[in-house]
Protein backbone atom coordinates (compact mmCIF):
# COMPACT_ATOMS: atom_id res chain seq x y z
CA UNK A 1 0.00 0.00 0.00
CA UNK A 2 1.23 3.48 -0.86
CA UNK A 3 1.35 6.17 1.83
CA UNK A 4 0.94 9.71 0.47
CA UNK A 5 1.70 13.11 1.98
CA UNK A 6 -1.48 15.13 1.54
CA UNK A 7 -1.02 18.19 3.76
CA UNK A 8 1.38 19.92 6.13
CA UNK A 9 2.07 22.99 8.23
CA UNK A 10 5.06 24.46 10.06
CA UNK A 11 5.00 27.02 12.88
CA UNK A 12 8.48 28.22 13.81
CA UNK A 13 10.63 31.29 14.34
CA UNK A 14 10.56 31.74 10.55
CA UNK A 15 6.78 31.86 10.11
CA UNK A 16 3.42 30.25 10.70
CA UNK A 17 3.05 28.39 7.39
CA UNK A 18 5.14 25.88 5.47
CA UNK A 19 5.46 28.39 2.63
CA UNK A 20 6.91 31.08 4.92
CA UNK A 21 9.42 28.65 6.38
CA UNK A 22 10.45 27.25 3.01
CA UNK A 23 10.84 30.73 1.52
CA UNK A 24 13.11 31.87 4.36
CA UNK A 25 15.31 28.80 4.04
CA UNK A 26 15.65 29.19 0.28
CA UNK A 27 16.72 32.80 0.91
CA UNK A 28 19.19 31.75 3.63
CA UNK A 29 17.36 33.52 6.47
CA UNK A 30 17.80 32.21 10.01
CA UNK A 31 15.33 32.43 12.88
CA UNK A 32 18.08 32.03 15.48
CA UNK A 33 18.66 35.18 17.51
CA UNK A 34 20.62 36.04 20.63
CA UNK A 35 18.50 35.80 23.76
CA UNK A 36 19.82 38.18 26.43
CA UNK A 37 19.05 36.39 29.67
CA UNK A 38 15.57 36.85 31.16
CA UNK A 39 12.93 34.15 31.60
CA UNK A 40 14.77 31.30 29.87
CA UNK A 41 18.25 31.75 31.29
CA UNK A 42 20.36 34.23 33.28
CA UNK A 43 23.01 33.76 30.58
CA UNK A 44 22.63 35.00 27.01
CA UNK A 45 22.48 32.33 24.30
CA UNK A 46 21.31 32.01 20.67
CA UNK A 47 17.93 30.36 20.12
CA UNK A 48 14.99 30.29 17.72
CA UNK A 49 11.73 31.30 19.43
CA UNK A 50 8.15 31.38 18.18
CA UNK A 51 6.62 34.87 18.38
CA UNK A 52 4.27 34.59 21.38
CA UNK A 53 2.34 37.78 20.58
CA UNK A 54 1.68 36.64 17.02
CA UNK A 55 0.75 33.15 18.21
CA UNK A 56 -1.76 34.51 20.74
CA UNK A 57 -3.24 36.88 18.18
CA UNK A 58 -3.82 34.22 15.54
CA UNK A 59 -5.06 31.64 18.03
CA UNK A 60 -7.51 34.19 19.42
CA UNK A 61 -9.46 33.88 16.17
CA UNK A 62 -10.45 30.30 16.97
CA UNK A 63 -10.43 30.03 20.79
CA UNK A 64 -9.61 31.83 24.03
CA UNK A 65 -5.80 31.75 24.38
CA UNK A 66 -5.97 31.81 28.18
CA UNK A 67 -7.59 28.36 28.13
CA UNK A 68 -4.58 26.78 26.45
CA UNK A 69 -0.82 26.63 26.99
CA UNK A 70 1.62 27.96 24.36
CA UNK A 71 2.37 24.41 23.25
CA UNK A 72 -1.32 23.54 22.94
CA UNK A 73 -2.00 26.71 20.95
CA UNK A 74 0.79 25.84 18.51
CA UNK A 75 -0.40 22.26 18.11
CA UNK A 76 -4.06 23.13 17.58
CA UNK A 77 -3.23 25.84 15.03
CA UNK A 78 -0.84 23.61 13.13
CA UNK A 79 -3.14 20.59 13.02
CA UNK A 80 -6.07 22.77 11.97
CA UNK A 81 -4.16 24.31 9.06
CA UNK A 82 -2.75 21.00 7.83
CA UNK A 83 -6.12 19.22 8.02
CA UNK A 84 -7.81 22.05 6.11
CA UNK A 85 -5.17 21.74 3.40
CA UNK A 86 -5.51 17.97 3.08
CA UNK A 87 -9.30 17.93 3.56
CA UNK A 88 -9.22 14.71 5.58
CA UNK A 89 -11.89 14.02 8.20
CA UNK A 90 -9.91 13.85 11.44
CA UNK A 91 -13.05 12.84 13.38
CA UNK A 92 -13.54 9.75 11.24
CA UNK A 93 -12.94 6.47 13.16
CA UNK A 94 -10.52 5.56 10.35
CA UNK A 95 -8.35 8.60 11.17
CA UNK A 96 -5.69 8.89 13.88
CA UNK A 97 -3.71 11.73 15.42
CA UNK A 98 -0.13 11.05 16.54
CA UNK A 99 1.57 13.49 18.93
CA UNK A 100 5.36 13.71 18.90
CA UNK A 101 7.07 15.61 21.73
CA UNK A 102 9.95 15.19 24.15
CA UNK A 103 8.74 17.45 26.95
CA UNK A 104 5.08 18.35 26.30
CA UNK A 105 3.70 21.00 28.68
CA UNK A 106 6.88 21.03 30.76
CA UNK A 107 6.33 24.73 31.57
CA UNK A 108 3.40 23.70 33.79
CA UNK A 109 5.93 22.53 36.35
CA UNK A 110 6.82 26.17 37.03
CA UNK A 111 5.37 27.63 40.24
CA UNK A 112 3.51 30.51 38.62
CA UNK A 113 1.73 28.16 36.19
CA UNK A 114 1.18 25.07 38.29
CA UNK A 115 -2.28 26.20 39.47
CA UNK A 116 -3.43 27.85 36.23
CA UNK A 117 -4.20 24.60 34.38
CA UNK A 118 -5.35 21.16 35.57
CA UNK A 119 -2.43 19.16 36.94
CA UNK A 120 -2.89 16.31 34.45
CA UNK A 121 -2.01 18.60 31.53
CA UNK A 122 1.69 18.28 32.42
CA UNK A 123 1.50 14.57 31.54
CA UNK A 124 1.72 13.57 27.88
CA UNK A 125 -1.52 11.62 28.16
CA UNK A 126 -3.20 14.71 29.61
CA UNK A 127 -1.97 16.80 26.67
CA UNK A 128 -3.28 14.13 24.30
CA UNK A 129 -6.70 14.13 25.99
CA UNK A 130 -6.90 17.92 25.65
CA UNK A 131 -6.18 17.75 21.91
CA UNK A 132 -8.65 14.88 21.50
CA UNK A 133 -11.39 16.90 23.21
CA UNK A 134 -10.71 20.05 21.19
CA UNK A 135 -10.97 18.27 17.83
CA UNK A 136 -13.69 15.84 19.02
CA UNK A 137 -11.68 12.86 17.81
CA UNK A 138 -13.07 9.35 17.63
CA UNK A 139 -9.74 7.82 18.61
CA UNK A 140 -7.38 8.74 21.43
CA UNK A 141 -4.13 10.21 20.04
CA UNK A 142 -1.05 8.03 20.02
CA UNK A 143 1.97 9.67 21.73
CA UNK A 144 5.48 9.01 20.41
CA UNK A 145 8.19 10.34 22.72
CA UNK A 146 11.63 8.95 21.91
CA UNK A 147 14.16 11.78 22.29
CA UNK A 148 15.17 13.64 19.14
CA UNK A 149 13.97 10.99 16.68
CA UNK A 150 10.38 11.37 17.91
CA UNK A 151 9.06 13.34 14.93
CA UNK A 152 10.65 11.09 12.32
CA UNK A 153 9.82 7.89 14.17
CA UNK A 154 6.19 9.03 14.40
CA UNK A 155 6.05 9.29 10.59
CA UNK A 156 7.25 5.71 10.27
CA UNK A 157 4.75 4.56 12.93
CA UNK A 158 1.91 6.37 11.14
CA UNK A 159 2.88 4.85 7.79
CA UNK A 160 2.92 1.35 9.30
CA UNK A 161 -0.51 1.84 10.87
CA UNK A 162 -1.95 2.77 7.48
CA UNK A 163 -0.17 -0.09 5.69
CA UNK A 164 -1.56 -2.53 8.27
CA UNK A 165 -5.08 -1.43 7.38
CA UNK A 166 -5.92 0.05 10.78
CA UNK A 167 -6.38 3.61 9.48
CA UNK A 168 -6.85 5.47 6.22
CA UNK A 169 -5.44 8.81 7.35
CA UNK A 170 -2.94 9.79 10.04
CA UNK A 171 -2.20 13.35 11.16
CA UNK A 172 1.13 13.68 12.93
CA UNK A 173 1.93 16.77 15.01
CA UNK A 174 5.37 17.31 16.50
CA UNK A 175 5.97 20.13 18.98
CA UNK A 176 8.25 21.33 21.76
CA UNK A 177 8.83 24.65 23.50
CA UNK A 178 11.82 26.16 25.26
CA UNK A 179 11.65 26.60 29.02
CA UNK A 180 14.25 27.18 31.76
CA UNK A 181 14.17 23.42 32.40
CA UNK A 182 15.04 22.58 28.77
CA UNK A 183 17.67 25.30 28.39
CA UNK A 184 19.42 24.55 31.69
CA UNK A 185 19.55 20.88 30.78
CA UNK A 186 21.51 21.54 27.61
CA UNK A 187 23.64 24.13 29.39
CA UNK A 188 24.59 21.49 31.95
CA UNK A 189 25.90 19.35 29.09
CA UNK A 190 27.85 22.38 27.87
CA UNK A 191 26.45 21.58 24.43
CA UNK A 192 25.07 25.01 23.47
CA UNK A 193 26.99 27.05 20.91
CA UNK A 194 27.76 30.70 21.83
CA UNK A 195 26.71 31.64 18.28
CA UNK A 196 24.26 30.19 15.74
CA UNK A 197 25.18 26.57 15.11
CA UNK A 198 27.42 25.47 12.24
CA UNK A 199 26.60 21.87 11.30
CA UNK A 200 29.57 19.82 10.03
CA UNK A 201 31.85 22.87 10.10
CA UNK A 202 35.40 22.63 11.47
CA UNK A 203 34.72 25.54 13.84
CA UNK A 204 31.39 24.28 15.20
CA UNK A 205 30.96 24.70 18.95
CA UNK A 206 27.65 23.04 19.69
CA UNK A 207 23.94 23.18 18.98
CA UNK A 208 21.36 25.97 18.93
CA UNK A 209 17.98 25.30 20.52
CA UNK A 210 14.67 26.14 18.91
CA UNK A 211 10.97 25.74 19.54
CA UNK A 212 8.43 24.90 16.87
CA UNK A 213 5.45 22.83 15.82
CA UNK A 214 4.76 20.95 12.60
CA UNK A 215 1.98 18.77 11.26
CA UNK A 216 2.16 16.29 8.40
CA UNK A 217 -0.78 14.34 6.98
CA UNK A 218 -0.31 10.74 5.80
CA UNK A 219 -3.04 9.15 3.69
CA UNK A 220 -3.77 6.02 1.70
CA UNK A 221 -5.45 8.28 -0.87
CA UNK A 222 -3.35 10.11 -3.46
CA UNK A 223 -3.79 13.88 -3.36
CA UNK A 224 -1.48 16.48 -4.82
CA UNK A 225 0.35 18.92 -2.55
CA UNK A 226 1.32 21.26 -5.38
CA UNK A 227 1.62 21.09 -9.15
CA UNK A 228 1.14 17.64 -10.61
CA UNK A 229 3.44 15.65 -8.33
CA UNK A 230 2.70 13.66 -5.22
CA UNK A 231 5.12 12.47 -2.54
CA UNK A 232 4.91 9.20 -0.68
CA UNK A 233 6.65 7.51 2.23
CA UNK A 234 8.42 4.65 0.49
CA UNK A 235 10.45 3.21 3.36
CA UNK A 236 11.56 3.61 6.93
CA UNK A 237 13.28 1.96 9.86
CA UNK A 238 14.59 2.63 13.36
CA UNK A 239 17.39 1.21 15.47
CA UNK A 240 19.17 1.68 18.79
CA UNK A 241 22.92 1.41 19.24
CA UNK A 242 22.60 1.37 23.07
CA UNK A 243 25.80 3.40 23.30
CA UNK A 244 25.12 5.94 26.06
CA UNK A 245 22.27 7.79 27.75
CA UNK A 246 23.26 11.05 26.01
CA UNK A 247 26.41 10.51 23.92
CA UNK A 248 26.02 9.32 20.31
CA UNK A 249 27.74 6.21 19.02
CA UNK A 250 31.39 6.66 18.09
CA UNK A 251 31.07 4.27 15.15
CA UNK A 252 27.79 5.21 13.41
CA UNK A 253 26.74 1.54 13.26
CA UNK A 254 23.29 2.15 14.73
CA UNK A 255 22.32 4.87 12.26
CA UNK A 256 23.81 2.81 9.42
CA UNK A 257 21.53 -0.10 10.37
CA UNK A 258 18.48 2.19 10.23
CA UNK A 259 19.56 3.52 6.83
CA UNK A 260 20.20 0.02 5.48
CA UNK A 261 16.78 -1.26 6.55
CA UNK A 262 15.00 1.88 5.31
CA UNK A 263 16.54 1.38 1.86
CA UNK A 264 15.60 -2.30 1.90
CA UNK A 265 12.00 -1.55 2.88
CA UNK A 266 11.76 0.92 -0.03
CA UNK A 267 13.35 -1.57 -2.46
CA UNK A 268 16.07 0.97 -3.16
CA UNK A 269 19.85 1.11 -3.29
CA UNK A 270 22.09 4.02 -2.34
CA UNK A 271 22.21 5.21 -5.95
CA UNK A 272 18.47 5.95 -5.86
CA UNK A 273 18.85 8.65 -3.18
CA UNK A 274 19.16 12.21 -4.54
CA UNK A 275 19.87 13.90 -1.21
CA UNK A 276 20.05 13.31 2.52
CA UNK A 277 18.42 15.58 5.08
CA UNK A 278 20.56 14.74 8.09
CA UNK A 279 20.23 15.45 11.80
CA UNK A 280 23.29 17.73 11.91
CA UNK A 281 23.13 19.20 15.41
CA UNK A 282 26.59 20.79 15.09
CA UNK A 283 27.85 19.03 18.21
CA UNK A 284 31.28 17.45 17.70
CA UNK A 285 30.24 13.85 18.30
CA UNK A 286 26.86 13.84 16.51
CA UNK A 287 28.24 15.24 13.26
CA UNK A 288 31.23 12.86 13.31
CA UNK A 289 28.93 9.89 13.96
CA UNK A 290 26.65 10.83 11.06
CA UNK A 291 29.62 11.15 8.71
CA UNK A 292 30.70 7.63 9.66
CA UNK A 293 27.19 6.21 9.18
CA UNK A 294 26.86 7.86 5.77
CA UNK A 295 30.21 6.36 4.72
CA UNK A 296 29.25 2.92 6.02
CA UNK A 297 26.19 3.17 3.76
CA UNK A 298 28.37 4.14 0.80
CA UNK A 299 26.61 7.50 0.44
CA UNK A 300 29.49 9.90 1.01
CA UNK A 301 28.95 11.52 -2.42
CA UNK A 302 25.21 12.06 -1.95
CA UNK A 303 24.34 15.76 -1.33
CA UNK A 304 23.55 16.25 2.36
CA UNK A 305 22.18 19.10 4.44
CA UNK A 306 21.22 20.01 7.99
CA UNK A 307 18.45 22.54 8.64
CA UNK A 308 19.41 23.29 12.25
CA UNK A 309 21.09 26.58 11.27
CA UNK A 310 17.70 28.00 10.26
CA UNK A 311 15.44 27.06 13.19
CA UNK A 312 17.74 25.43 15.72
CA UNK A 313 17.21 21.99 17.24
CA UNK A 314 13.45 21.78 17.82
CA UNK A 315 13.56 18.43 19.66
CA UNK A 316 10.29 16.52 19.18
CA UNK A 317 9.31 18.74 16.25
CA UNK A 318 12.63 18.43 14.38
CA UNK A 319 11.90 15.23 12.45
CA UNK A 320 8.49 16.48 11.33
CA UNK A 321 9.69 19.94 10.26
CA UNK A 322 12.76 18.68 8.44
CA UNK A 323 10.68 16.01 6.67
CA UNK A 324 8.21 18.64 5.46
CA UNK A 325 11.00 20.86 4.14
CA UNK A 326 12.55 17.84 2.43
CA UNK A 327 9.23 17.00 0.80
CA UNK A 328 8.86 20.53 -0.52
CA UNK A 329 12.48 20.47 -1.65
CA UNK A 330 11.54 17.50 -3.86
CA UNK A 331 8.44 19.28 -5.15
CA UNK A 332 10.25 22.55 -5.88
CA UNK A 333 13.46 20.95 -7.08
CA UNK A 334 15.66 22.85 -4.62
CA UNK A 335 18.60 21.63 -2.60
CA UNK A 336 18.80 23.87 0.49
CA UNK A 337 22.23 24.76 1.78
CA UNK A 338 23.48 23.93 5.26
CA UNK A 339 23.44 27.36 6.88
CA UNK A 340 26.62 28.06 8.87
CA UNK A 341 28.73 25.47 7.06
CA UNK A 342 31.95 26.66 5.42
CA UNK A 343 34.89 24.37 6.14
CA UNK A 344 34.52 20.56 6.36
CA UNK A 345 35.31 19.35 9.85
CA UNK A 346 33.98 15.83 10.42
CA UNK A 347 35.64 12.44 10.78
CA UNK A 348 34.68 11.12 7.34
CA UNK A 349 34.06 12.76 3.98
CA UNK A 350 30.46 13.82 3.27
CA UNK A 351 29.00 16.00 0.52
CA UNK A 352 27.56 18.89 2.54
CA UNK A 353 25.38 21.25 0.48
CA UNK A 354 27.04 24.67 0.77
CA UNK A 355 24.88 26.63 -1.71
CA UNK A 356 21.15 26.43 -2.39
CA UNK A 357 20.58 25.30 -5.96
CA UNK A 358 17.93 23.94 -8.29
CA UNK A 359 18.07 20.27 -9.11
CA UNK A 360 15.70 17.52 -10.23
CA UNK A 361 14.89 15.52 -7.12
CA UNK A 362 12.93 12.30 -6.67
CA UNK A 363 14.10 10.53 -3.51
CA UNK A 364 15.19 11.91 -0.13
CA UNK A 365 16.62 10.03 2.83
CA UNK A 366 15.77 11.76 6.12
CA UNK A 367 17.69 10.59 9.19
CA UNK A 368 17.73 11.48 12.89
CA UNK A 369 19.52 10.33 16.03
CA UNK A 370 18.93 11.04 19.70
CA UNK A 371 19.72 10.44 23.36
CA UNK A 372 19.79 6.82 24.43
CA UNK A 373 21.25 5.71 21.10
CA UNK A 374 18.01 5.89 19.09
CA UNK A 375 18.15 6.31 15.31
CA UNK A 376 15.53 6.64 12.57
CA UNK A 377 15.53 6.81 8.77
CA UNK A 378 12.63 7.51 6.40
CA UNK A 379 12.60 7.77 2.60
CA UNK A 380 10.32 10.20 0.75
CA UNK A 381 9.75 9.79 -2.99
CA UNK A 382 8.05 11.72 -5.76
CA UNK A 383 5.45 9.73 -7.70
Image (spheres, grey):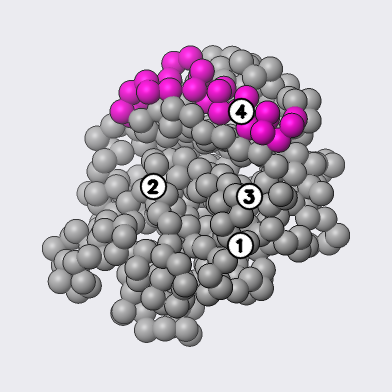
Q: Earlier in the sequence, mark 1 or mark 2?
A: 2
Question: Helix, strand or loop at disc 3?
Answer: helix
Measured in 3D between alpha carbons, the distance from the residue under mark 3 to the one under mark 2, in whole angstroms, is 22 Å
Give me the residue at 57% from left, 66% from top: 94
Pick the residue in front: 86 or 309.
86
Q: Earlier in the sequence, mark 4 or mark 2?
A: 2
Pick the residue in front: 108 or 159.
159
Q: Is residue 72 above or below residue 269?
A: below
Question: Helix, strand or loop at disc 1?
Answer: strand
Q: Residue 163 shows which numbered tag? A: 3
Q: Residue 261 shows which numbered tag? A: 4
Q: Check if residue 245 falls in the magenta segment.
A: yes
Pick the residue in front: 182 or 243.
243
Measured in 3D between alpha carbons, the distance from the residue under mark 3 to the one under mark 4, in whole angstroms, is 17 Å
Percent position of residue 358, x then y: 81, 43
Q: Confirm or deny contact between disc 4 and disc 2 (CB under 8 A).
A: no
Q: Residues within 10 Å of mark 3 (few under 14, many from 20)?
A: some
Q: Nearer the viewer, mark 4 or mark 2?
A: 4
Reading the image, the residue beneath label 2 is 145
Span highlighted in magenta in the image: 241-268
Q: Is residue 207 above or below residue 324?
A: above
Give me the residue at 43% from left, 22% from top: 241
Q: Nearer the viewer, mark 3 or mark 1?
A: 3
Reading the image, the residue beneath label 1 is 169
Q: Residues within 10 Å of mark 1 (few under 14, many from 20)?
A: many
Give me the residue at 15% from left, 71% from top: 115
Amino acid sequence: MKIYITGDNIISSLGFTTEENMDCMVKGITGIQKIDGGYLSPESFPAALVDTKKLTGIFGNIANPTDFTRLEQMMILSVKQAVETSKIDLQNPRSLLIISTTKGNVDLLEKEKITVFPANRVYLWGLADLIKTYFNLSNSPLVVSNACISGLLAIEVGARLIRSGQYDDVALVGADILTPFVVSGFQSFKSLSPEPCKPYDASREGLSLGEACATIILSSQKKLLEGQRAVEVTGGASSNDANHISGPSRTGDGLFIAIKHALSSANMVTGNIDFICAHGTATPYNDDMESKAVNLAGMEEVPLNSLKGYIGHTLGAAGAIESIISIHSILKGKLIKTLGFQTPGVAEKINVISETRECELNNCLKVASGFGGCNAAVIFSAV
